[in-house]
Image (spheres, rainbow, N blue to C red):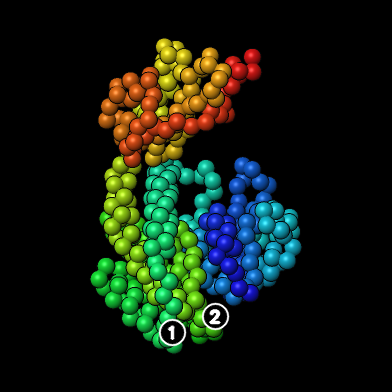
Amino acid sequence: MKIDEMEMDVIFKKINKSDIILKNGSEQFVSLKYDSTNWSAPAVVCKRNFDFNYCLTKIAEKIGIPCVENKLLTKALFDETHEWYCISDKYYMSVSKIYQTLKCRGLWKPINDDNFFDRLRKNSNYQICYTEIRLLKRAIRKYLKSFNDCVNTDTDDVIEKFKQELYDLSKNNNLIYRISSQPDLGTEEINLDFFLEEYNITFWQIIFISQKERKIYIGTRAFIKAFEFSESKKALGLIKTITGTICKEIKRDAILYQKEFDINVKIYDIVQNSLPVMLEENYMKTGIEYGFLSDTTAITFYLSHKSSDTTHPQRMHEIVITYKEFMRDPTAFKNFIAAPHKKYKWNFWCHERVYKKERLDEKFKQEEKE
């Protein structure tokens, strides 16, 4: 069974939301998600049944989602459970044992079961992954827009050409190059990894060349793309574009983020305790209502000043600032929230948004009700 790029993108997004993947060889896979605060049991997020499963499970492993071989359980869940439905009680014990085994091996942690530094590492990695996805998508759009279609007439040497070209690319850009063959699937798998040793971060590309389908699949943390053998020149150019983006822009931002997000519990507590007081004092002086949410990398604020002008829809300001940037000059931030305005800085920015009262603190929602 073949899939188009749109369906591939949907599958990829579902995999990214999963905790684990159960597989039945290369025939079937079922991805699961467990959120004990909202669900009574793990739920099936995605299930697929086609030849491309091998590629998808390899990409899932790259993303950090453990894949477990269990043929009978995978087939049963595949046949009996719809996507986004919780698993039946009769499978709960078998699935919970798999979760427990992965937890003991440090491959899975329940939601809200992390200490501060676990959360900090997870949130920092999320920020870096989000930036990687954003930059890669921008790079691919720019590349595909500027690429002049050039159909290859000779497609017999695609595999050997890719092996040599990607080997040379890895040498020139300090990439880790690994290749493996899957004769039963008729595929060649090439991995290109870029490792930031100081921060233990890996950026990767995985390329599957299918002789049987005469297709080239390119997988990253941001997307999966498929090309015909006749588009091999286009596919090769995309891989080089991705490599350049990783080695320059994404590497630069990852290092910058790691330094900015390197905080401790003391800094976290100071900011978490100072901000509510500062926002409340600002409300008492200016009448600017507030709401905020945070993780361990940055804080997001929503500020709204009630207006008597009913001719224009009410607006609110959305502000994002890192903990370190706040600590550098709390007084400047205090002055800023008294008169919020547009600001553009990667670790402290402010935009105007459509007013949504649900973003405000609960006390202001109550005031409106009264």
Name the spot of residue 147 as percent of width and height, x first. Answer: 39, 66
* Residue type marked 2: Glu
Query: Seen in the image, is 293 located left or right of residue 14?
Result: left
Name the spot of residue 71 as percent of width and height, x first. Answer: 64, 72
| SS at circle 2 | loop
Name the spot of residue 172 as percent of width and height, x first. Answer: 25, 71
Residue displayed at 74% across by 63% down: 80
Number of numbered labels in the structure image: 2
User: Does residue 220 appear in the picture of this structure?
Assistant: yes
Q: Along the line of sight, which residue is nearer the eye, 303 or 94?
A: 303
To which quarter of the image does residue 192 belong? bottom left
Query: Seen in the image, is 215 located left or right of residue 32?
Result: left
To which quarter of the image does residue 165 belong? bottom left
Name the spot of residue 138 as percent of width and height, x first. Answer: 40, 55
* Residue type marked 1: Thr
User: Does residue 195 appear in the picture of this structure?
Assistant: no
Q: Give neighbour class at mark 2: few <14, some 14-19, many 20+ (Cα, 10 Å).
A: few
For label 1, the residue is 153
Q: Along the line of sight, which residue is nearer the eye, 68 or 238?
A: 238
Q: Along the line of sight, which residue is nearer the eye, 157 or 309?
A: 309
* Camera-side mark, 1 or 2: 1
Q: Is residue 352 above or below residue 171?
A: above
Q: Along the line of sight, which residue is nearer the eye, 359 or 202?
A: 359
Residue displayed at 51% across by 81% down: 214
Residue displayed at 33% across by 55% down: 250
For label 2, the residue is 213
Instruction: Say which quadrant the N terminus sits in.
Output: bottom right
| SS at circle 1 | loop
